Amino acid sequence: MKINIKLSIVVSFLLLFIFFSCRKEETILIDRTQDPGLKANSTVANLMNRTSLHDGSKDNIIDRASCFSIKLPVTVIANGTTIVVVTANDYEVIESIFDDSSSDVDTIEIIFPVTLIFSDFTEVTVNSQSELESFIDDDCNSGIDDDIECLDFQYPITASVFNTSNELLNTITISNDNEMHDFIEDLNDDVIVNINFPITITLFNGNDLIINNLNELETAIDNVKNQCDEDDDNDFDDDDNTDMDAQGFSDLLTACPWKVDELKVNEQDFENVKNTVLTFNADGTVSAELNNTSSGGTWSIITNDGLRLQLTMDTLTEFNNTWRLSKIETEDDGKDKVELRKGEDELKIIKNCN
């Protein structure tokens, strides 16, 4: 009986020895991996952190501060017009109101209280304009910020995290920029982090790039970080690409038919006219066709205070307006898209040469 007890004790000690030997060997294997893993304060970690920061420059037309943004929705009064800003697209409504005339003084009033979102995703509620301005320093007002906006991570991203102090191995999932920022900020010398590659990043031009390791990620971010206009300044018209004269605008409109992508008048979306094909003729007439139904009218270009398209339709009167040329851009398929506005109203048309 005593022999059996002693034998059991010996076996137990042998099992414990084998367990700790294997555990130690596993730790050695992790420490000696060819990929050193993501380290705190490394160059690639800092670049990843800057890429994940919250962009505070998108709403500079409201707060003129790049170090934070105002949490939506927010109500503002632009040149006397009350606007409820619900999405980022509504910033263009404010710009349109400002651009309706170049001879007036543009004013904007924020209806408080509002919540400020800073680059590290912390939030602060402010109750007045003076309280808001207390958070704006010289760098913030000049449009200087640390965030990298020329690329975005595609989430989710998973990573293996080994804690050398307690020998715990976890797999975590990062679902958005906020979680990525917190993840990078929490890195320390006690953890070994391996990103589960490949991951995908989306560049400012819409192209996706597959990344297979940390070296590739560091190179990709470093190469692209200064290749786009992050629009951190307070020049709200520099992305409109409308630098043309009346003849150029006329040639653009008459070169091909145009398909209606969006029409919004008096806060009403006219979905029934979407995909209407507008053909601008050189003689000043315009035809509209949708579902084998045709309508006619006239058009002209007015050069008073910018380029404006005056449309007068016989039956489709929802198009009738003196539309200001707001923006010209190229879609991913290479087609030109023209954005026309009148205050809060907007008309978007896409070149339809086929």
Image: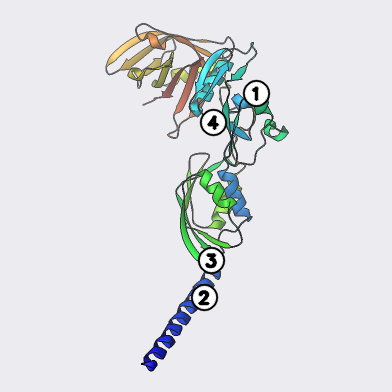
How far apart are the two marked residues, 2 and 3, measured between alpha carbons? Answer: 12 Å
Q: Please tell me whether mark 2 or mark 3 is closer to you in this view.
A: 3
How far apart are the two marked residues, 4 and 3, measured between alpha carbons? Answer: 40 Å
**Earlier sequence position, callout 2 versus callout 3:** 2
User: What is the three-letter code of the residue carrying label 3?
Assistant: Asn
The quadrant of the rendering that contains the C terminus is top left
> Does 280 sit above or below residue 190?
above
Q: Position of residue 232 (x, y in %)?
A: 63, 33
Q: Position of residue 284 (x, y in %)?
A: 44, 9
Residue corresponding to mark 3? 166
Q: In the picture provided, is 193 more to the left or to the right than 282?
A: right
Q: Residue at x 63, y 24 (%)?
A: 128
Mark 1 crowd level (few <14, some 14–19, many ≥20, 10 Å Cα): some
Q: Residue at x 63, y 54 (%)?
A: 43
Q: In the picture provided, is 175 more to the left or to the right than 146?
A: left
**Earlier sequence position, callout 4 versus callout 2:** 2
Residue 80: image quadrant is top right
How far apart are the two marked residues, 1 and 2, measured between alpha carbons? Answer: 60 Å
Residue corresponding to mark 2? 24
Q: Secondary structure at mark 1?
A: helix
Q: What is the number of the mark on residue 71?
A: 4
**Earlier sequence position, callout 1 versus callout 4:** 4
User: What is the three-letter code of the residue carrying label 2?
Assistant: Lys
